[in-house]
Image: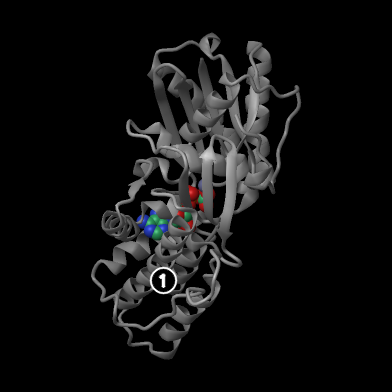
Amino acid sequence: MIVLGIESSCDETGVALYDTDRGLLAHEIHSQIDLHALYGGVVPELASRDHIRRLVPLTTQILHNAGLQRGEIDGVAYTSGPGLAGALMTGALMARSLAFSLGCPAIGVHHMEGHLLAPMLEDETPPFPFICLLVSGGHTLLVQVEGIGRYRVLGESLDDAAGEAFDKTAKVLGLPYPGGPHLAKLAVDGDAKAVKLPRPMLNRPGLDFSFSGLKTAAITELRNNPHLSKADLAASFQAAVVDTLLAKCERALKQQGISTMVISGGVGANQLLRDQAETMSAAAGWQVFYPRLEFCTDNGAMIALVGALRLNAGEFEELAVNIKPRWSLEELGAV
Ligand code: KG4
Ligand code: ZN
């Protein structure tokens, strides 16, 4: 079964073709970063308009790259939430219309389920059950994954997401949007021990996170000490976020008696996070899996994959355009 996947929940237009027999056939991503950089954050209306411009040419492109005709598509998957309502609507309408014209089924996919299962696009896939640390610009979640559609949210951020804290701190450091990767680059030349920053919520039980206080502490250090090295602050901030994320992962793995861990979402591209996760899991005898870097951030491949798994299992959606700007992972059904 060949499934076209469409991602348009935020500021990336992603399309992909996934075959349940042969795996990923083709994919393309168009990032809107340049479009929103001027405003220091995503402007929803501009995002929707750009998705409309990109969706059809990108789809034509991947069909060409895979050497397929439109008529060979057996199903269409689209991100139906969570995300920006207008942006979601563009992908949903394109997916629904195309499926209707081809006479094939369409299915709405949960964006976070895409991030959770993205490592299944790789040759070596994580065995169930695993604990996923899902860290993106909008979410910080620790999820126990028992199987496809069987998710238990063990912990989440009570305020800023990890990526959001990276981006806001980077902005104060004068770095371009989105600041996460720029801050990480600046941190390479900094001393992570130079500035003492809190490791929030570690002395409390439970698996929730809070990054707003850490972000404010970093920004206050810079305001109070204008001569502080920006690289030192970046390195100290990054180390505090990574320590906090991994301490909660370790707690979750031990508490649930699970030895497989997945790191996904945009912040999952962070090299320090990956290096420290490797060190932690090697010491404990755990295994850690990640999607390749381009599938950590938003992409169509993860949506095509989830759509293919669900359509192949016989899931079916009535002819309607479904978008859910807010949507809990735990509402999903098992496959
Ligand atoms: O998953 P994603 O592409 O979009 C959302 O669904 O939010 O994640 C984007 C987030 C941004 O906050 C970005 O700054 C952050 O991921 N990010 C990073 C790195 N690469 C991307 N944060 C820290 N280090 C990185 N290398
Ligand atoms: Zn995402």
Mark 1 element type: loop
Q: Is mark 1 within 8 Å of ligand 1?
A: no
On screen, residue 203 versus residue 246, left or right, reads: right
Q: Residues within 10 Å of mark 1 (few under 14, many from 20)?
A: few
Residue at 41% in and 73% down: 173
Viewer-proximal residue among 57 and 67: 67
Q: Amino acid at mark 1?
A: Gly
From what the image shows, is residue 17 above or below residue 37? above
Residue at 26% in and 54% down: 282
Name of the residue lying farthest toward the left = 189
Quarter holding the C terminus is top right
Residue 327 spot, x, y in % from top left: 68, 46
Residue at 60% in and 53% down: 43
The colour scheme of the drawn protein is one colour
Viewer-proximal residue among 274 and 279: 279
Q: Decide if residue 12 is in sight here.
A: no
From what the image shows, is residue 254 above or below residue 28? below
Residue at numbered disc 1: 174
Residue 331 spot, x, y in % from top left: 69, 42
- Give the total of numbered labels: 1
Q: Decide if residue 98 is in sight here.
A: yes
On screen, residue 137 versus residue 273, left or right, reads: right
Residue 89 spot, x, y in % from top left: 68, 37
Residue at 59% in and 27% down: 77
Q: Quadrant of residue 246?
A: bottom left
